[in-house]
């Protein structure tokens, strides 16, 4: 039954996703992902922070009735953190599967968030899982496991900013079908803000218009532009009674920059939007 889908975090704690995770599609990404899942193709979700990549995947896992294992990547993540390790206990040594191995055995969708943060020697353990054999060799136990039906590797990647020095190797990139995400178009973003932020339609539309104006400051040196996530945070504050200007300052402007002149320019845009 769809309503009883299990999700497992990287510490192996199962949780229950009861309700359908709300996701408003922008194009044909749902059908494309479904085909990738059916054809056993690994997927890379590309797009800026806060544009809906994680929400999309939660929605897809619910649609496909697959457990979802999420792993947040960072540069201390080792192959053992993914695959597993021997644990020494008072009564002997036992093997404990890592989250990737659990996903392979259980036929889960394994989501590596911000994969570019992981070291390359960690990322290469994914390679044998992305070709037609779908195998995971576990050197420490001598075992090689074949991925259960339903297993799918999904990674996310924010192109553009952090990675002057870090990037995925071509031999990694070329193992994934890439789905490109952008901030939703105006009407859709307003519908998302209305629903997720509990705002009325007029406020949601005004926040979208503010978002577009602020995104235009990219050319004037604003390195990070506001995501849908930030606009939702402002909507939540407004709908809980905080004044519009305070909400926009605290939830949108201040998180984006410390530069006084940019902050001033952003405040002016708030005033121009909410006259
Ligand atoms: N198309 C959408 N449908 C429904 N909600 C959306 C959509 N796009 C964005 N959101 C909302 O925006 C929030 C942020 O999206 P999400 O966490 O999925 O971003 P992300 O792309 O995974 O960001 P990051 O790269 O920082 O992890 C979600 O919690 C959700 O409320
Ligand atoms: Mg995410």
Image (cartoon, rainbow, N blue to C red):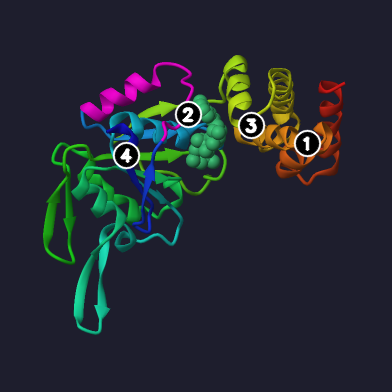
Tell me if the residue at label 1 has its CB under 8 Å from ligand 1. no
| Residue corresponding to mark 3 | 197
Q: Which quarter shows the C terminus?
A: top right
Q: Which sits earlier in the primary sequence, circle 1 or circle 3?
A: 3
Residue 174, quarter of picture:
top left
Check residue 241 in the rendering and tell me which mark sits there, or answer none.
Answer: 1
User: How far apart are the two marked residues, 1 and 2, measured between alpha carbons?
Assistant: 25 Å
Counting from the top left corner in percent of width and height, residue 243 is at 83, 35
Counting from the top left corner in percent of width and height, residue 46 is at 45, 32
Tell me if the residue at label 2 has its CB under 8 Å from ligand 1. yes
- Foreground mark, 4 or 3, reads 4
Residue sitting at x 64%, y 29%: 198
Which SS class for mark 3? Answer: helix
Circle 2 crowding by C-alpha within 10 Å: few under 14, some 14–19, many from 20? few
| Residue corresponding to mark 2 | 22
Tell me if the residue at label 4 has its CB under 8 Å from ligand 1. no
Counting from the top left corner in percent of width and height, residue 152 is at 26, 38
Side of 3 relative to 242 (left or right): left
Between residue 27 and residue 258, name the one nearer to us: 27
Q: Which sits earlier in the primary sequence, circle 4 or circle 3?
A: 4
Circle 4 crowding by C-alpha within 10 Å: few under 14, some 14–19, many from 20? some
User: How far apart are the two marked residues, 4 and 1, measured between alpha carbons?
Assistant: 35 Å
Q: Label 4 near label 2: C-beta < 8 Å?
A: no
User: How far apart are the two marked residues, 1 and 3, measured between alpha carbons?
Assistant: 12 Å
- Foreground mark, 1 or 2, reads 1
Residue sitting at x 33%, y 51%: 123
Between residue 55 and residue 145, name the one nearer to us: 55
Give the residues in magenta: 19-38
């Amino acid at each position: 039954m769809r309503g009883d889908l299990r999700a497992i975090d990287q510490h192996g704690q199962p949780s229950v996703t009861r309700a359908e995770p709300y996701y408003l599609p922008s194009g044909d990404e749902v059908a494309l992902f479904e085909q990738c899942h059916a054809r056993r193709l690994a997927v890379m979700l590309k797009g800026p922070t806060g544009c809906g990549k994680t929400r999309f995947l939660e929605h897809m896992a619910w649609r496909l009735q697959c457990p979802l294992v999420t792993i947040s990547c960072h540069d201390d993540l080792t192959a053992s953190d993914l695959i597993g390790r021997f644990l020494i206990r008072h009564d002997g040594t036992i093997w404990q599967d890592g989250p990737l191995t659990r996903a392979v055995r259980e036929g889960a969708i394994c989501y590596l968030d911000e994969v570019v943060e992981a070291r390359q020697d960690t990322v290469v353990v994914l390679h044998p899982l992305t070709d037609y054999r779908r195998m995971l060799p576990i050197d420490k136990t001598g075992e090689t496991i074949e991925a259960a039906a339903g297993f799918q590797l999904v990674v996310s990647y924010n192109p553009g900013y952090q990675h002057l020095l870090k990037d995925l190797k071509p031999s990694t990139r070329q193992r994934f079908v890439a789905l490109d995400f952008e901030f939703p178009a105006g009407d859709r973003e307003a519908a998302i803000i209305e629903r997720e932020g509990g705002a009325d339609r007029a406020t949601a539309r005004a926040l979208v218009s503010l978002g577009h104006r602020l995104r235009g400051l990219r050319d004037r040196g604003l390195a990070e532009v506001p995501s849908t996530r930030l606009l939702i945070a402002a909507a939540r504050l407004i709908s809980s009674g905080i004044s519009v200007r305070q909400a926009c300052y605290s939830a949108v402007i201040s998180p984006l920059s410390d530069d006084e002149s940019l902050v001033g320019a952003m405040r002016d845009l708030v005033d121009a939007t909410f006259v």
